[in-house]
Each structure stands twice: as structure tokens, then as C-alpha cells.
Image: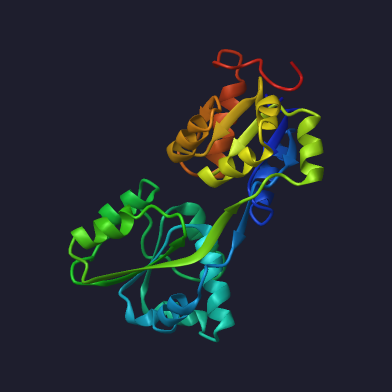
Amino acid sequence: MSILRGKRVAVTRSDEQADALCSKLEALGAVPVRCPTIRIGPPSSYEAVDAALRAVDTYDWVVLTSANGVRAVLARLEEIGVPTARLGGTKVAAVGRVTAGVLADHGIAVAFIPEVEGSRSLAETLPDVTERGILVAQGEKADPILAKVLRGRGARRVDTLTVYRTIPIPPSGAALEELRRGVDAITFTSPSTVAGFMGLGQEWREIAHGVIVASIGPTTTAAGRASGFEVHAEARERTIGALIDALVSAFAPSAPGAGKGAGQ
């Protein structure tokens, strides 16, 4: 029997992204509590985005840093009438397996995925960079380290595009009622999900008191701790599977914080 059976787990991902995590939790007998604290929005302007996408096959590399970035690029290509096949005229790199999977789902071949997921790792290990033109499609709050490292490695041109924004939002009224009923764990998948949860005001402290908090990675963990959360578990890599593994480990009897939760 799974250690997560019967556990109420708050899922703070956006509605568009929550299904995969909720499905995996349900498969382990947990009860996902959907309380999106972010939504994905368009960039403030499409002018630079559209210009770059119309010339996408003039770049040597197109780098996608998230699944949201893939969806945003594909949606915009369709909107402006540029065939997705134009991506076949360049090489495509993905920051990790999840991003690569979304590309594959749309029939787009991925030429490079770093062994260690992350923007810095991708920038440091992307092959054939010197004197190349590189297009980086990312979110508004993306780490600038990727472009900085690529330029430092001798790329002729690195154009960064903000193709979407992650907007923190407080949980809705219905979600808040579910949170007030009590949860055993809260999952955070980005610093923005933490920021959105903080939109509850001081009530977040009551909801999070005695609850296991799990983070998808170091940046999110740092954001959680800076906001006052005790983070008990961190995924070893930025994937949903690793986040669930961390959650399972946090509930193990020998784990620090074990025994916390709504039912305790």
C-alpha cells in the first residue's frame, strides 16, 4: 500500500499543467486538492516574438526552456500562419525530458537534451555553439544565465524571447474552502506558485501549519523558505515523478517532519 494513500495533497500548478501531477497522485491513492496559484498569460507584446518566429529557420538552434514555452511557441506559430515544419530547418534543444516530451508529442525532433536538467547545464553543454545564431524561447522570469553562458561560449547571436508570463494568483474561493478543510501536503513547482499562495495573506500560515511542504527544485525551495515555509522535501530533478518521490520520502516514518498532516 502506498504511503500516500488517503493523503490530501495541495497542487498549486496552473489548471493547464495540473493533470499529470493529479493523475500520478491519484494512482498512489492520494487525494489531490487543486488550488492553482499561477496562471499562464501572454507576453506584454508579440512584436519581437512574431518577428523571430517568422525567421525561425534562420537560426542554427532554437532552445526551449519549458513545456509552457513549447506550447506558447506552437500556438503563436499557428496564430501568425507559420508552419510548424519551419522548425525542421533548425536544430531544437530542450531543457529537460518534460519539455522534450511536449515537443515530441507535436512531431518535433529534439536534437539535444542536457544530461543534467537546467538552464545552466543546457548552456554549458549545448554543442556546436561557436559563431552560431541561437533563439531562446522562455518565460518572463527566466534565469538570464542561459543567454549569458551561450554568449560567453562564442555564439554569434543569442536572441531571447519572452513567449509567456507566469502570473501568481491567490487560490479561488472554492479552492480555499478545500484548503481550509485541511491538507497533508503542499506541492510547489515554481517560485511563482509560492508567490501565489502568499496571496492568502496570513491565512497561509494556518493552512501550512503542520503540513509537509514539497518543492520541485532548489530555486523553488529557496523561494519557499524566504517566504517562511518549512520545506521538508525537494525533488532530485525538475520532474513530476521526482517531486512525488520526494513527497513519498517525506512521509516515510523515519523522515524529518513525518507524522505531519491534516490527519495528525
Left or right relative to 148: residue 12 = right
The residue sitting at 55% across, 86% down in the picture is: 81
Residue 199 in view of the camera: yes
Where residue 227 sits in the image (x, y, percent)?
Answer: 53, 33
From the viewer's perspective, is residue 26 above or below residue 148? above
Q: Residue furthest top?
A: 254
Left or right relative to 151: residue 20 = right
Numbered marks: total: 0
Where residue 255 sits in the image (x, y, percent)?
Answer: 55, 16
Front residue of 81 and 195: 195
Residue 103 in view of the camera: no
The residue sitting at 54% across, 73% down in the picture is: 74
Place residue 35 in its image quadrant: top right
Query: What color scheme is it?
Result: rainbow
Place residue 52 in its image quadrant: bottom left
From the viewer's perspective, is residue 90 above or below residue 111? below
Front residue of 214 and 168: 168
Location of the N terminus by quadrant is: top right
Where residue 248 sits in the image (x, y, percent)?
Answer: 60, 27
Left or right relative to 243: residue 124 = left
Q: Residue furthest bottom?
A: 81
The residue sitting at 51% across, 84% down in the picture is: 83
Place residue 42 in its image quadrant: bottom right
Left or right relative to 101: residue 31 = right
Q: Residue furthest front?
A: 201
Where residue 250 sits in the image (x, y, percent)?
Answer: 57, 23
Location of the C terminus by quadrant is: top right
